[in-house]
Amino acid sequence: MTKLLNFFADKRGAAMIEYGLIAALVSVVLIAALTALGGDLDALFGSIGSAVDQAA
């Protein structure tokens, strides 16, 4: 019984779970931002590519 109580009282894994949740939230925000800006980024890199082709 004391092992079970010690298991529930142990807080060492809580920080790792919080870091995992933060990493998941950051990845969701990055995916949403890149999806929203996808067309603009494609146009930007296309114009950069054509400018490099013309300069060469």
Image: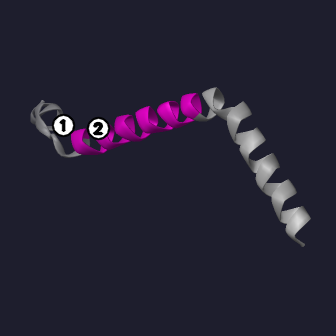
Q: Residue at x 32, y 43 (%)?
A: 19
Rendering coords of residue 43 (x, y %):
77, 40
Q: Based on the displayed image, in which of its 4 quarters is residue 36 positioned?
A: top right
Q: Residue at x 37, y 34 (%)?
A: 21
| Disc 2 element | helix
Rendering coords of residue 22 (x, y %):
35, 37
Badge 1, how many Cα within 10 Å: few under 14, some, many 20+?
A: few
Q: Residue at x 51, y 31 (%)?
A: 28
State the residue position of label 2: 18
| Disc 1 element | helix
State the residue position of label 1: 7
Amino acid at circle 2 = Glu
Q: Is residue 20 left or right of residue 45?
A: left
Amino acid at circle 1 = Phe
Q: Between tags 1 and 2, which lies in front? A: 2
Residue 22 in the magenta stretch? The answer is yes
The answer to which of 11 and 16 lies nearer the viewer is 16
